Amino acid sequence: TMLTAYLAPVLPQTAANAARFLNLDAITWKNTRETLGEHAINKYEHLMQRVEQKQVDDLIEANKQSIQTASAPVEEGKYEKVAEQAGFDDFMKIDMRVAKVLNCEAVEGSTKLLKFDLDFGFEKRIIFSGIAASYP
């Protein structure tokens, strides 16, 4: 169930099919630690179709024109430069932190927002994020 929870944001239909096979309503982070033990599962069905190398080659061949167009160099002066490109020194100025999620809950009246209580180790913060649609 944990692997399916990891796949859910990237392959939601595959995760839903796996949940159906495992005879679960949904696979969420809350139920990934539950052992299925004597849990009854449904009849196995393939979750994905195997992709053969010939299929990949055919897709590449069919899209060669668009690939060449997309990789064509951009001519100078054809676009307006919005800002200077960020360099490594600019990246080093960024302060990234890891926090422990103490609590996460839906924001009443919103379909997009989640409220997170975070512990950074040296301080606690409350943040809001519009990622509710990505998590069941």
Image: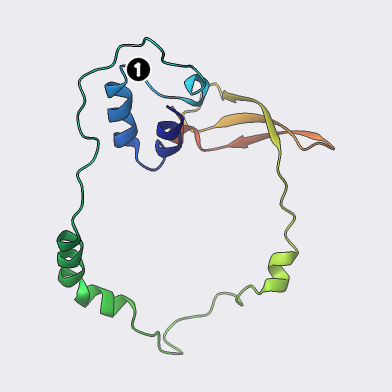
Q: Quadrant of the C terminus?
A: top left
User: Residue 107: percent from the left, percent from the top?
Assistant: 56, 25
The quadrant in which residue 16 appears is top left
Of 85 and 43, which appears nearest the observer? 43
The quadrant in which residue 15 appears is top left
Residue at (37%, 9%) from the top-left corner? 38
The quadrant in which residue 108 appears is top right
Could you tell whether 61 is left or right of 1 in the image?
left
- Mark 1, secondary structure of its residue: loop
Residue at (42%, 27%) from the top-left corner? 1
| Residue, disc 1 | 24
Could you tell whether 48 is left or right of 135 in the image?
left
User: Residue 28: percent from the left, percent from the top?
Assistant: 46, 25
User: Residue 127: percent from the left, percent from the top?
Assistant: 67, 35
Of 30 and 95, which appears nearest the observer? 30
User: How many labels were placed on the picture?
Assistant: 1
Q: Is residue 68 above or below residue 22?
A: below
Q: Is residue 38 above or below residue 31?
A: above
Q: Residues within 10 Å of mark 1 (few under 14, many from 20)?
A: some
Residue type beneath disc 1? Leu
Q: Is residue 62 above or below residue 79?
A: above
Q: Is residue 29 above or below residue 84?
A: above
Could you tell whether 63 is left or right of 82 in the image?
left
Residue situated furthest bottom in the rendering: 76
Could you tell whether 82 is left or right of 55 in the image?
right
Residue situated furthest right in the rendering: 122
User: Residue 56: percent from the left, percent from the top?
Assistant: 20, 62
Residue at (38%, 21%) from the top-left corner? 26
Residue at (48%, 19%) from the top-left corner? 31
The colour scheme is rainbow
